[in-house]
């Protein structure tokens, strides 16, 4: 019974091994072929592959994928039996390391064992040994031993392996050098060895994995298989043939690559533009949980010991209580669950009728467009056949579109010449995916361009060459600032100032044909366009102004932008000359002027008071300095001298003057404080505009 578990494992992981039956799969399965019928390629780097076909009764289908594709397959595989059948199981090769898989068999082939090593692993098994003489011995393997036997060129001893068997005649020894063949008599061992060898064989093509789909039912039934795999991003290229007027021919091509190992034969191809979220998750690699290892509790046997005798009599010891051992509860029976086979709901959908493939001007658009949720798809109308590792160009658009010709000037692109441009309007019903455009004009190559995604009805400027016949010179104009209004509020003087930026463009058409030059001027969200009043259009970063220029003529464009800015200053900190400046400005209202005039008067009185106080303080300083000089001179004079007496008189007069000055200074300081309070009260209560 010890071989049943490995065989069950092989049955699940290696459905191709003879004798191994997939779980849930009936024994009378027939091989089925369900061809690839539909392919949807996305611009997010994946493709949806759909197989449609029939199976008869119980059937199985084998698909082969690379190891890197299995994760996408396991994440996205959808199976449908549309006529009452069911999907019994899906089996695939494990990605366990091959050494781990080989160790799961009863015969371990991981270390490239010798015949002796192989026989040692199967001790106790019955074998039939064919000898070189043609005779056969049957017995049970006891073991393999090595002996020294004569065999060298000079009769030297060499080591040889001998197989020891327990036969009906007794124990016998057979030299492995004489053995021509060994067969295990027990079928389970022989099958296990064959399964291990099959794993080794499949490992040689380890990058290719088989996935087997098992269908269960009766009679012929329609089945559908769908899955997502990594695929190259499909691309678009365009050709724009410019016409004489505003009508041009736009031709679009889709570039697809079949990088798989399967030929596409009459596949319904759909190309989807959009970026659905897609990712890779490793579902193929087996995951194992680390579990703790719990050691059994072992009890050490007691060793006998010699006890010493007591030196004195011991007190009587109490009897120990015996502990009753509780009987352990029996384990609960394990639960069993029967897995029902997977059965998907029946849903039938026939393939849509494919419209005819017409030819127009040598190349016909082979695609129709349609919205699919947030995505846009191109359905290729004719079935596509593309061999493996090949690429193809498929026409998706071939029709007239409208578009006006311009010369587009941007000083950051070229400071002198504009670019030839066409304002292309997508007048088709298709969503044009981003891609390069090759432009032809007057039957010859004119340049290359590029478009972003363009919805039906949308317009985009396509620039393809430098317009050497047109010159543009951009120069900055004046940038004056004007006072718009003033107001006073809560002690602050607010000024509204309008700033202005001007850029002048001088345009010269040196050619003979009339042109319309589109001038791109930088857009600034905090500035307002003043002149011209309106632009032809505005992009995220620029205004565009259309300026017609006749052949051989010149013209100019002045772009003026304004910005209104409000500035503020503390009213109390305004100097007298600032107040005088605003009193003369005609923008300032009469109420504000009256308030400013009163403020000027109050500030004038305060200034006069401050000036008087400063003059008296200066006189005090002057007298103090003079007294210091006099006292220094008096120290060197005779007190009875006339000069000494005159100095005494002068000091007395100056002291009288200092007293009067200090009284005046104190009064003036009180007056200043009062005047400052009056000004502060006036300012705080002022609300005029």
Image (cartoon, rainbow, N blue to C red):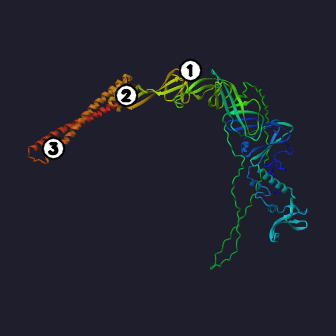
Q: Nearer the viewer, mark 2 or mark 3?
A: 3
Along the line of sight, the residue nearer the viewer: 41 or 631: 41
- Name the one closer to the observer, 646 or 249: 249
- Between circles 2 and 1, the one closer to the viewer is 1
The x and y percentages for residue 194 are 83, 54
Determine if residue 5 is in view: no
Residue found 86% across the figure and 56% down from its top: 187
The residue wearing badge 3 is: 630
Numbered label tally: 3
Q: Is label 2 in a helix, a strand or a loop? A: loop
* Crowdedness near tag 1: few (<14), some (14–19) or many (≥20) residues, C-alpha within 10 Å: few
Task: Give the residue at mark 2.
Answer: 686
Residue 222, placed above or below residue 399: below
Any mark on residue 512, and which? 1
For this view, does 326 lie left or right of residue 145?
Answer: left
Residue 477 visible here: yes
> Where, quadrant-wise, is the C terminus in this rendering?
top left
Where is 126 relative to 617, above or below? below
Q: Nearer the viewer, residue 313 or 391?
A: 391
| Label 2 – label 3 distance at C-alpha | 54 Å
Q: Is residue 291 left or right of residue 85?
A: left
Helix, strand or loop at label 3? It is helix
């Amino acid at each position: 019974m010890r071989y049943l578990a490995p065989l069950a494992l092989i049955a699940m992981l290696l459905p191709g091994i003879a004798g191994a039956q997939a779980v849930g799969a009936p024994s009378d399965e027939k091989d089925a072929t369900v061809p690839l019928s539909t392919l949807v390629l996305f611009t997010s780097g994946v493709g949806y592959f759909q197989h449609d076909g029939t199976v008869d009764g119980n059937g199985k289908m084998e698909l082969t994928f690379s190891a890197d594709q299995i994760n996408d397959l396991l994440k996205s595989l959808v199976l449908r039996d549309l006529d009452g059948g069911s999907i019994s199981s899906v089996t695939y090769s494990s990605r366990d390391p091959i050494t781990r898989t080989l160790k799961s068999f009863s015969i371990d082939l991981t270390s490239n064992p010798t015949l002796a090593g192989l026989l040692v692993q199967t001790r106790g098994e019955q074998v039939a040994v064919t000898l070189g003489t043609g005779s056969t011995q049957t017995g049970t393997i006891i073991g393999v031993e090595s002996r020294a036997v004569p065999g060298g060129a000079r009769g030297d001893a060499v080591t040889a392996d001998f197989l020891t068997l327990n036969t009906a005649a007794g124990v016998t020894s057979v030299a492995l050098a004489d053995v021509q063949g060994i067969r295990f008599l027990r079928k389970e061992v022989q099958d296990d060895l064959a399964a291990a060898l099959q794993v080794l064989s499949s490992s040689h093509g380890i990058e290719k994995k088989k996935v087997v789909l098992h269908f269960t039912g009766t009679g012929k039934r329609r089945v559908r298989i769908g899955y997502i795999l990594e695929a190259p991003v499909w691309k678009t290229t365009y050709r724009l043939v410019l016409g004489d007027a505003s009508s041009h021919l736009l031709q679009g091509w889709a570039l697809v690559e079949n990088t798989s190992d399967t030929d596409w034969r009459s596949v319904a191809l759909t190309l989807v533009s959009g970026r659905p979220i897609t990712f890779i998750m490793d579902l193929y690699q087996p995951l194992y949980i680390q579990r703790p290892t719990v050691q059994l509790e072992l009890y050490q046997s007691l060793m006998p010991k010699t006890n010493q005798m007591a030196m004195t009599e011991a007190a009587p010891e109490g009897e120990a209580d015996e502990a009753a051992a509780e009987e352990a509860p029996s384990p609960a029976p394990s639960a069993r669950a029967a897995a029902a086979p997977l059965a998907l709901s029946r849903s039938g959908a026939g393939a849509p009728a494919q419209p005819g493939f017409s030819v127009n001007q040598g190349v016909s658009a082979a695609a129709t467009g349609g919205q699919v949720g947030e995505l846009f798809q191109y359905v290729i109308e004719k079935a596509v056949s593309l061999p493996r590792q090949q690429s193809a160009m498929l026409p998706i658009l071939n029709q007239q579109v409208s578009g006006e010709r311009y010369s587009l000037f941007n000083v950051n692109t070229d400071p002198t010449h504009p670019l030839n441009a066409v304002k292309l309007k997508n007048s088709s019903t298709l969503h044009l995916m981003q891609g390069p455009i090759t432009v032809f004009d007057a039957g010859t190559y004119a340049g290359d361009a590029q478009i972003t995604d363009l919805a039906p009805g949308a317009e985009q400027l396509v620039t393809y060459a430098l317009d050497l016949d047109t010159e543009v010179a951009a120069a900055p104009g004046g940038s004056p600032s004007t006072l718009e209004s003033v107001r006073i509020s809560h002690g602050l003087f607010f000024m509204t100032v309008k700033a202005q930026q001007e850029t002048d463009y001088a345009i010269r058409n040196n050619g003979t044909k009339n042109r319309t030059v589109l001038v791109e001027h930088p857009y600034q969200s905090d500035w307002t366009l003043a002149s011209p009043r309106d632009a032809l259009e505005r992009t995220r970063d620029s205004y565009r102004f259309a300026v017609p220029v006749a052949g051989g003529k010149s013209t100019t464009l002045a772009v003026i932008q304004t910005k209104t800015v409000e500035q503020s200053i503390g009213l109390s900190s305004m100097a007298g000359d600032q107040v005088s400046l605003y009193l003369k400005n005609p923008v300032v209202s009469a109420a504000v002027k009256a308030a400013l005039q009163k403020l000027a008067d109050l500030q004038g009185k305060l200034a006069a008071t401050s000036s008087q106080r400063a003059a008296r303080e200066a006189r005090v300083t002057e007298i103090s300095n003079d007294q210091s000089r006099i006292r220094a001179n008096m120290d060197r004079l005779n007190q009875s001298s006339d000069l000494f007496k005159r100095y005494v008189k002068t000091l007395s007069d100056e002291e009288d003057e200092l007293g009067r000055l200090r009284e005046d200074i104190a009064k003036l300081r009180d007056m200043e404080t009062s005047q400052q309070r009056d000004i502060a009260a006036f300012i705080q209560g002022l609300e005029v505009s």
